[in-house]
Amino acid sequence: GAVVSQHPSWVICKSGTSVKIECRSLDFQATTMFWYRQFPKQSLMLMATSNEGSKATYEQGVEKDKFLINHASLTLSTLTVTSAHPEDSSFYICSARNVRTVYEQYFGPGTRLTVT
Amino acid sequence: DAKTTQPPSMDCAEGRAANLPCNHSTISGNEYVYWYRQIHSQGPQYIIHGLKNNETNEMASLIITEDRKSSTLILPHATLRDTAVYYCIVRPGSNDYKLSFGAGTTVTVRA
């Protein structure tokens, strides 16, 4: 149980295009999902908190108009990187908080984004 | 947020216990200690968490000092698959579920 999936697992896109990454909780409902970014040899950095049915809360320094987050259902959140640039190339990871097991977050396998 | 301090790296022998220390001297009374690990190019994996008492599950044991200023994660019989970056995280508040990841400890299990 407590499986979180991400799609795609990797994507290559051209500079200026937009890319959508999906995060799904497969066997539980998640009212809250989190999006992280991880550059090579660095730790995870929280980008935003996504609550089902409401606007996402972005961490300081994260451009909300560039990283669009939608959490339309209890099992799906999406992150859209708009007008991607090479510096957006990174490992994007989502996590989901199970509404029934308050204390634990479950992470997806991550999405490797490369912008050329 | 309470911050944690972990050694940057450590080696351990396969089959032996691995003891991973973590200092969190500014932890507040209602803050939990969480441990996650991240195997290369994968998402983090939850290991264990605790508040005051020692905890054990199928993966590891968590020993928290009485003053709660430090803790130790114990992997009882390390295997090569336990090679990963281990993160000790103090989670703030009861309604804030954000996790702040530090640099963690890179654990290398050697045969």
Image (cartoon, coloured by chain):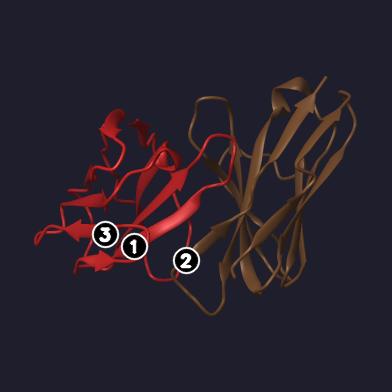
Decide: few, some or many residues near mark 1? Use Cα within 10 Å; few <14, some 14-19, many ≥20. many
Q: In which quadrant is the C terminus of chain B drawn?
A: top left
Q: Position of residue A95 (x, y in %)?
A: 60, 56
Q: Is residue A10 left or right of residue B55?
A: right
In the rendered view, would you say A13 is above or below A67?
above
Q: Colour of chain A?
A: brown
Tell me how far mark 2 sits from mark 3, CA to CA.
Answer: 16 Å
Q: Circle 3 marks a residue in which chain?
A: B
* Secondary structure category for the residue under label 1: strand
Residue topped by disc 3:
B61
Q: Residue at x 23, y 55 (%)?
A: B27
Residue topped by disc 1:
B49
* Secondary structure category for the residue under label 3: strand
Q: Position of residue B57 (x, y in %)?
A: 34, 66
Q: Is residue B19 left or right of residue A99?
A: left
Give, as a three-letter code, the residue at label 2: Glu
Which chain did the renderer colour red?
B
Residue topped by disc 2:
A104
Q: Residue at x 38, y 44 (%)?
A: B87
